[in-house]
Image (cartoon, rainbow, N blue to C red):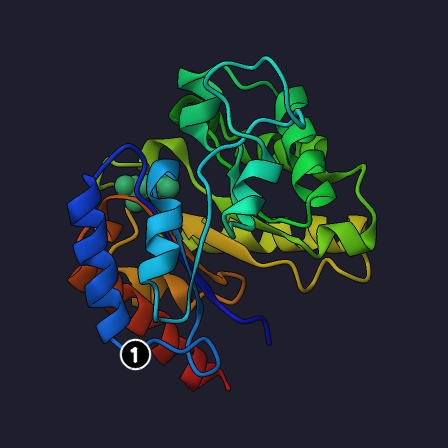
Amino acid sequence: MRKKIVAANWKMNLLQHEAATFMTSLSESSLSSSTGPDVVVFPPSIYIENLITLNTADVRFGAQNAYFKESGAYTGEISFGQLKSIGCSVILVGHSERRTEFSESPSVIKKKIDAALGNDFDCILCIGESLSIREMGAHLEFLKNQLLESIEHLNENQVAKISIAYEPIWAIGTGLTATVHQVNEVHDFLRSTLIDKFPEAGNNVRILYGGSCNEENANELFACLNVDGGLIGGASLDVNKFLKIIHAANEVSRIEH
Ligand code: PGA
């Protein structure tokens, strides 16, 4: 049985004191990854070090972005080595906002994955189709290509460090969650694609759902066979909502066992 992950993607939200208050509430909630899901928070990078210091809960902190070069004249960028030096070892790669707003190409995404693995990071790789691709009925083929172009060069050990987040672009921040039927179709398809390509590790790679996942729909989404948790944007900014989502993952895992 794959352990679920509940991850918060704060994007460019919350001020330092709000982030600290969130962390204090999360710490008071006595989360435990031995009984519950793995919980990962992706705050803006400037807060990571402070949040790690405040953290008394069983939570990991990841970066929303990093550059693949080791060091040098790359103004404004942060390297994996620098993140590692403050105790951060999880990274989000390939989010649709980075692909579109910051023109991140498949080749950059691949380099980031390689740099992440080289620095022993765990990666959450985001993939997702646009509304027009879905309306054309081309989403499965598109997702297969988007997945494989980033990971097919990896070996079985390396792919074990990767989780996938399926985030349909039309569902991100729109309040329009994919239906259970749509989620099952994609997640089952991604699972078989992973197993075909990686017969040993493919069944253990965790596939998260993201896109208007919230405290009300988390339960039914997490109950889908190949949904191994969620990547939560808007609903992760409110600690009470986020805790309800963590509890939903906990509840579903308890029933599955
Ligand atoms: P959302 O964002 O939950 O606000 O839709 C998810 C994401 O972009 O990771």
Residue 110 picture location, percent across and down: 68, 29
Q: Is residue 71 visible?
A: yes
Residue 157 sits in quarter: bottom right
Residue sitting nearer the eye, 55 or 6: 55
Q: How many marks?
A: 1
Mark 1, residues whose alpha carbon is within 10 Å: few (<14), some, or many (≥20)?
few
Tell me which image quadrant ligand 1 sits in. top left
> Residue at position x 32%, y 36% from top?
11
Q: Amino acid at mark 1?
A: Ser
Q: Which residue is mark 1?
A: 30
Q: Is residue 98 above or below residue 7?
A: above
Residue sitting nearer the eye, 98 or 69: 69
Q: The N terminus appears in which quarter of the rendering?
A: bottom right
Q: Is residue 185 above or below residue 251?
A: above
Q: Is residue 52 above or below residue 170?
A: below
> Residue at position x 72%, y 36% from top?
114
Residue 222 picture location, percent across and down: 40, 65
Q: Is residue 234 left or right of residue 163?
A: left
Q: Is residue 135 visible?
A: no
> Residue at position x 42%, y 37% from top?
168
Residue 181 picture location, percent across and down: 42, 54
Element type at mark 1: loop
